[in-house]
């Protein structure tokens, strides 16, 4: 029970008590560091009481253990002593919140020896503003029955004033820390909202979180609601963050709880929690505590932001609020980045559409100009009436020239009638014959470029329904692309066959493989886009046209594989039954 100041007779000749009380009170205005204040307080206490040693012990809010903060007259190793509440004399005082006078420690079962010379002890609780015990002040003597009730009142008086002073200094420090955190949070918000590229943004969030929360590791997971999975996208605080990957379902860890409840969750002991994520990192870095806050934007869960500490730590309400605010800022920044990406892609799509419109008008004009000289070429070629023996290779060349003139006229007609509801004439075609005719067209090109050709085809027909000219145009585009990928020569392998599609329907396919340099990685996902080209002289329309033609035939073209050792492209069309 704490004794009021009036219980102490200030008329006592020993005015040092009053002086000590005054000096302790003035620490509020003279100091900023609570630890420095505790050092002065213990010196004042030991001056006015008949003590050979003294200590101020504080309760650690993370471990709830009583730890020696400052001491006098004890061995150096005493600093490592930690007591549970209720353990020892000071632990009993901390648990019950009452002062205790022990005239002879040798007959008190609660006493835990810290120094062999101690014979008597006096301990008083430090009661905070809300009635909670925050620590204990104790003094010891090497004499039995060294302290009396008056000493108990003096220590209680000084302890109460010391508690008030230290609590005020802690409050001032806390307010300053919160002000610093607020400034840091504002600066962090300004920093991350400037980022536009999503990968750079996510890494910036974890970097800033690591600095703001003063933790060991920060990680950010994005949530895929369709698969109900969390994927690690950014991490800070570990040296090998680039190579670390993680994919979790909501039921695999506590992170799923943060997503489902949409509330910040805390794990105080990762080693004892059934956490399947981050196990190697947790073990290697000795991570102990976790704070996980969901990243939510307008009721949409985007992901979770995690802070890990390498010591046992109970996150305060202030820390949780700061972290939740940071997660909220991150949600806005991520959403802005996504919107920016969509706007950028829309603008790019509009630019391509504008270029296609211009190209369409130009193509119509060019087609109109081509039609007249093409008609003259047809008339003159027919007038030549070229006749060659059947075994002469030129006889086949004449047939091909006639077909190509017809094909050119068909292309001109399609361009001029573009937009009209008219389908090209499609007939049953043997895919083997279409490939053979196309390879005949480029035989000289292969010879000039020192390209070896290998054709692998089945013995039976592979029938499809297609426009002969458009099918050859698609094959020709792919073969020429393969040729241009091998400027120093190489090998092209053409495989014709039939297979079952992912939907279970039979399809006819042609695989064209080259031994060229491959498609650059940044272009692999966009090679079928209009105007995309990796060659200075290219138009970027070849593969886009191939895809349009095949899709109009209910088929498609795809990049099967690519590497510095070569590329394989595949086209497929619905397979017809043989009659």
Image (cartoon, rainbow, N blue to C red):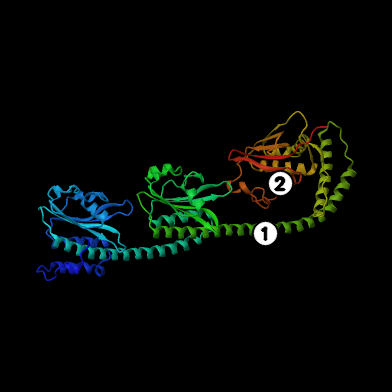
Residue 110 seen from this side? yes
Q: Nearer the viewer, residue 244 or 314?
A: 314
Q: Which mark is residue 547?
A: 2
Coordinates of residue 406 in the picture (x, y in percent): 84, 45
Q: Which mark is residue 133?
A: none
Extreme-bottom residue of the structure: 11
Looking at the image, is mark 2 or mark 1 earlier in the sequence?
1
Judged left or right of residue 118, residue 448 is right
Q: Residue furthest top?
A: 459
- Residue 436, image x, y percentages: 76, 35
Where disc 1 sits, the SS reads: helix
Q: Provide residue 9's location: percent of width, then percent of height.
A: 14, 69
CA separation, marks 2 and 1?
20 Å
Residue 35 falls in which quadrant of the image? bottom left
- Which residue appears at 70% of the width and 57% of the height? 353
Residue at numbered disc 1: 350
In front: 209, or 112? 112
Q: Which part of the image, by quadrant, shows the N terminus?
A: bottom left
Left or right of 288, for residue 300:
right
Where 460 sits versus 383, above or below? above
Which residue is more in the foreground, 519 or 417? Answer: 417
- Residue 56 occupies quadrant: bottom left
């Amino acid at each position: 029970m704490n004794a009021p100041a009036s219980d102490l007779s200030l008329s006592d000749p020993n005015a040092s008590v009053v002086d000590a009380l005054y000096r302790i009170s003035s620490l509020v205005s003279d100091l900023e560091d609570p630890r420095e204040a505790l050092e002065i307080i213990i010196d004042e206490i030991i001056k006015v009481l008949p003590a050979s040693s003294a200590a101020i012990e504080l309760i650690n809010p993370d471990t709830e253990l009583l730890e020696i903060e400052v001491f006098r007259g004890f061995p150096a190793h005493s600093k490592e002593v930690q007591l549970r509440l209720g353990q020892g004399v000071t632990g009993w005082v901390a648990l019950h919140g009452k002062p205790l006078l022990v005239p002879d420690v040798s007959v008190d079962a609660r006493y835990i020896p810290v120094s062999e010379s101690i014979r008597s002890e006096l301990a008083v609780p430090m009661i905070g503003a809300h009635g909670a015990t925050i620590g204990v002040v104790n003094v010891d003597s090497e004499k039995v029955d060294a302290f009396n009730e008056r000493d108990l009142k003096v220590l209680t008086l000084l302890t109460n004033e010391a508690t008030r002073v230290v609590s005020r200094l802690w409050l001032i420090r806390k307010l300053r820390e919160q002000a610093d955190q607020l400034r840091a949070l504002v600066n962090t918000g300004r920093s991350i909202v400037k980022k536009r590229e999503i990968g750079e943004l996510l890494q910036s969030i974890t970097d800033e979180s690591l600095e703001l929360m003063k933790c060991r590791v920060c990680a950010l997971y994005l949530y895929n609601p369709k698969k109900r999975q969390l994927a690690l996208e950014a991490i800070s605080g570990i040296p090998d963050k680039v190579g670390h990957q993680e994919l979790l379902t909501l039921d695999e860890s506590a992170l799923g709880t943060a997503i489902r409840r949409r509330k910040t969750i805390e794990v105080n002991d990762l080693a004892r929690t059934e956490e399947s994520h981050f196990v190697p990192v947790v073990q290697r870095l000795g991570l102990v505590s976790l704070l996980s806050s969901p990243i939510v934007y307008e009721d949409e869960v985007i992901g979770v932001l995690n802070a890990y500490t390498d010591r046992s730590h109970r996150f305060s309400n202030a820390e949780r609020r700061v972290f939740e605010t940071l997660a909220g800022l991150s949600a806005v920044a991520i959403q802005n980045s996504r919107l920016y990406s969509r706007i950028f892609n829309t603008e790019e799509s509009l630019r391509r559409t504008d270029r296609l419109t211009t190209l369409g008008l130009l193509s119509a004009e060019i087609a109109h100009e081509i039609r007249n000289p093409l008609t003259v070429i047809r008339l003159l070629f027919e007038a030549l009436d070229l006749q060659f023996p059947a075994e002469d290779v030129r006889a086949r060349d004449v047939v091909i020239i006639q077909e190509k003139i017809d094909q050119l006229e068909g292309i001109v007609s399609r361009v001029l009638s573009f937009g009209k509801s008219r389908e090209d004439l499609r007939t049953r075609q043997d895919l083997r014959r279409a490939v053979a005719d196309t390879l005949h067209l480029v035989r000289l090109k292969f010879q000039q470029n020192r390209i070896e050709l290998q054709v692998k085809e089945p013995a039976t027909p592979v029938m499809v329904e297609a426009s002969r000219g458009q099918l050859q145009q698609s094959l020709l585009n792919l073969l020429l692309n393969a040729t241009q990928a091998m400027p120093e020569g190489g090998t092209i392998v053409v495989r014709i066959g039939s297979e079952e599609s992912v939907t279970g329907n039979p399809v006819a396919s042609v695989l064209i493989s080259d031994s060229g340099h491959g498609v650059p990685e940044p272009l692999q996902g966009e090679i079928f886009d209009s105007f995309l080209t990796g060659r200075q002289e290219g138009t970027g329309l070849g593969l886009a046209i191939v895809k349009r033609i095949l899709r109009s035939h209910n088929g498609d073209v795809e990049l099967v594989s690519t590497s510095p050792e070569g590329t394989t492209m595949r086209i497929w069309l619905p397979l017809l039954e043989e009659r």
